[in-house]
Image (spheres, rainbow, N blue to C red):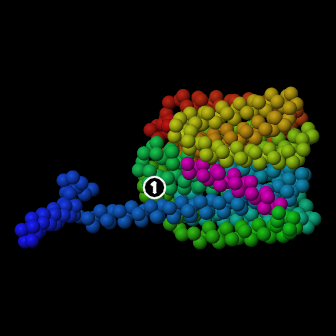
Amino acid sequence: MCLLSAPAMALRADGAATKRAMVHSLLRPRLFLHPPRGGLGADPSQEQTKAFGKHTDDRETARRWLLFHMTFTLRAVCDRSWAFFISIMLSSRVGSLVYLLRTAIQISFGLVSCRQSWEWLSLRKTEHVAWLFMVQQVSLLVVAIQLYMLEKGSAAMPMVLLLGIFSGMEMISSRHFKRVKEKKDVYDLVTRDAQGKQQEISSRLAAANSLLTRIDLLVACLCPLAINFSMSVLDRLGTMALLVALQLMSVLLLSFAPSSDVSLAGQPSPSMSVKQQGDKGGGAAAGSLKLRVLVLAYGLLYFTVVTPGGLFNMYMREEGLDVRLLGYFGSLAQVCGVLATFAVPVAARRLGMYPCALFFSLFQAACVAGVALLAARGELPLAMCLCAMSRFGLWGFDLSHRTLVQVQSDARLGLFLLEASLAETFSIAIFTASAISKSFRFLCQVSAVATCSSSALVLLSALLPSGSSSSRSM
């Protein structure tokens, strides 16, 4: 029995030794096959510190984005709600006077700000942002008081003048926040972790701008429904009190936001402070000729009546189109705008920003030209359908144009101000043309010429050479 057990015991010993060798080989650090990231002899604690720091930076970035989206949504809800509520509170006569005063104030601000180098226009300092925010809230409070007095039956001319002036000041403040502060904040947040790669910055900007536009369009769809529901439960004054309470809540939330965040703080990120030196004072040069042509193309899109709501709906009603049908087409237009926010990031990655902008501009021009042709033939439902579809091209071009301007770090402020003044100028021009001409078909043809000219300018901007390294074509 001992003779039989000796070989067995030897085999068992050899097997145990083999297992021990395998375990040691698995546990032994494989320095030559898989060296640490820091190289041979690197301290594992340094790697852990780097990993922890990266995780902390990711959490901080996510927190900043969350805070920015919350403040953006809150501002969008307040702005959209008040805009819709004011439009239904004013009669046609008072509303026309208020509109003219408000538009005149906006045009004056846009034209003057383009020719001045006021430091506060850049909204980099916290105190400048706080002052503009306070002006907006005080103006809105005065507008609410004037609306209350109008509802009580007092409609004196000084009251209407005050309403037009302060509503213009409120809209200037709101639009300056959107066109300068929020666009600059998006650029700062994107460039925090894009490592300076131009293509990566453009792609992330397109995605971030698309998400913000998507939020704004959804708010635009829901706010009129919420206001109508509130007015069915409460009266007009009760709804106005609800909006004032919402505005006060937004003031408290935005005022007590941490000053180090981009919600109300005006200081740029350290990584962008050097790049934004050329933007100080409003960008006197206002960008290269390439970008000026692109901004002019964007401004021409405001010289049109082919847009759901406003003049287009008024003419459709005069032609006998049913109100419910107008509502359906208005909802379809918002859906087309939301679809554009999904299409822009994909098109920007595959085509590039300038081809993407040209594609959406041509799409809108084709739709508006179709509206002019169908309106001349009297086929109004099909014309309304094409009008709604044109919003896909409009929002797609808006997002592409916005991204192209944002990546130009040396002239963003000047371009944004030039864009604002052109938009207001063309808006009052089409309003004046509609007051002079009573032919809706003629106005549709003028709108088609304006959008086609805009597409031609986009193509010209894409073909022009870049004025500087920062304004090169993507």
Local crowd at mark 1 within 10 Å, few (<14), some, or many (≥20)? some
Find disc 1 in the rendering and name its residue: 192
In the image: residue 454, left or right of residue 55? right
Residue 356 image point, x, y percent: 58, 36
Nearest the eye: 110 or 339:
339
Nearest the eye: 98 or 217:
217
Question: Considering only vertical position in the picture, is 9 above or below 191?
Answer: below
Q: Residue at x 48, y 61 (%)?
A: 61
Q: Quadrant of the N terminus?
A: bottom left
Asked whether residue 398 appears in the rendered view, the answer is no
Nearest the eye: 190 or 123:
190
Residue 296 image point, x, y percent: 64, 36
Is 227 magenta? The answer is yes
Q: Residue at x 54, y 69 (%)?
A: 258
Is 105 magenta? The answer is no
Q: What residue occupies the far front of the structure in this picture?
A: 1
Q: Main secondary structure of the magenta part?
A: helix
Question: Considering only vertical position in the picture, is 420 above or below 438?
Answer: below
In the image: residue 22, left or right of residue 462? left
Q: Where on the picture, by quarter, is residue 115?
A: top right
Nearest the eye: 43 or 405:
43
Q: What is the three-letter code of the residue carrying label 1?
A: Arg
In the image: residue 83, left or right of residue 3? right
Q: Where on the picture, by quarter, is residue 320?
A: top right
SS at circle 1: loop
Asked whether residue 252 appears in the rendered view, the answer is yes
Residue 211 image point, x, y percent: 60, 52
Q: Residue at x 62, y 46 (%)?
A: 341
The magenta segment:
207-228
Residue 333 image point, x, y percent: 74, 44
Q: Residue at x 82, y 63 (%)?
A: 229
